[in-house]
Amino acid sequence: MHRREFVALLGSVAMAWPLRVTAQQQRVPVIGFLSSASRDSDLFRPIPFQHGLKETGYVEGQNVTVEYRFAENQYDRLPALATDLIRLHAAVIVASGDDKVVQAVRKARAAIPIVSAFDPEERAFANRDGPADNFTRVAVFSTALTSKRLEVLRDLLPNVSVVGFIVNPRNPNAASDIKEIQEAGQKLGPQIIVINAADERDFAAAFAELARQRTGAITMQADALFNAAKNQLVFLAKQHAMPVIYTRREFVEAGGLISYGSNLTRVYRQVGIYTGQALKGSAKPGQLRIVFPTNFELAVNGKTAKALGLEIPPALLARADEVIE
């Protein structure tokens, strides 16, 4: 081989090498993760989600890329965020939140595989928008536990006659949640006072109004806004010396009295597994069975109970998954 031909060959190899690298990089699949909450919200569980992905052979940052988008509790941002993920050629989209997240993705591009963490009481459960071969869900259970939380509250405070219910009117489940707890109140006895809180600035006024109406205890709607402001809500409950039952264990860890809800670590691990299976193409999301939780977490903060002058009934303590002292 002549020297000139050899130099030309080296040049062609040097030019082809970046092209091969680029092609390999482009083959790394992208997962879109769209949430109605904020990155700091207690609803966001990246580690169990990543663990679930790993069980199917995908490791974030190695053979798969995950693009996270958060609406920061502003539902009007969801359509643009969903469109952004489609523009990035996401192979699968995880819809974390409520029905509006799912609908934003479907309107952006209905054919893309979607794995959603959902509430069985949401209207989307019926898949009323047509075939759902590209769609499956892992149940969180929020609205379905609204009446159950009132039962737990009654077990804790059997003589409570007035219970406040703080609800975000912007939440798409607001009407069904209010109906659920009012019906539960009629069966269990306590009068239910509904107070709206659509913004963090509404929280102080909501607690003050419930205290003015001599409310004996408070329960809250499962909502991303409330989860993001858990420290503020726990502080207000302590300030007013008000017994409150929350939707997540994280409130109790922050000093709240008691909580009853789904184990989000298990939920997001399963979401990760389903996302990996959809990415592999081993099964269409619509062929994957909808997963429902089989147990729920009851957490109690003994220190907070003592500060409120409450004695937790032994039967309730026996049922608790976690007691913080």
Image (tube, rainbow, N blue to C red):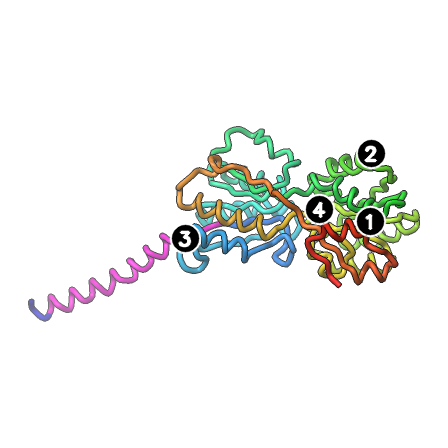
Q: Which residue was labeled with disc 2?
A: 187
Classify mark 3: residues with Cα within 10 Å, few (<14), some (14-19) or many (20+).
some
Task: State which region is magenta.
Answer: 4-31
Distance, label 1 to label 2, CA atoms, is 17 Å
Residue 181 x, y percent position in the rendering: 78, 38
**As shown in the figure, which amino acid type bears the numbered disc 4?**
Ala
Q: Earlier in the sequence, mark 4 or mark 3?
A: 3
- The quarter of the rendered structure image containing the N terminus is bottom left
Classify mark 1: residues with Cα within 10 Å, few (<14), some (14-19) or many (20+).
many
| Residue 245, above or below 190 | below
Q: Which residue was labeled with disc 1?
A: 156
Residue drawn at (46%, 57%), measured in percent from left and top? 60
Question: Do the numbered discs 2 and 3 sit on residues whose CB atoms are within 8 Å?
Answer: no
Q: Which residue was labeled with disc 4?
A: 222
Q: Nearer the viewer, residue 130 or 151?
A: 151
Viewer-nearest of discs 2 and 4: 2
Residue drawn at (60%, 54%), measured in percent from left and top? 44
Distance, label 2 to label 3, CA atoms, is 49 Å
Viewer-nearest of discs 4 and 3: 3
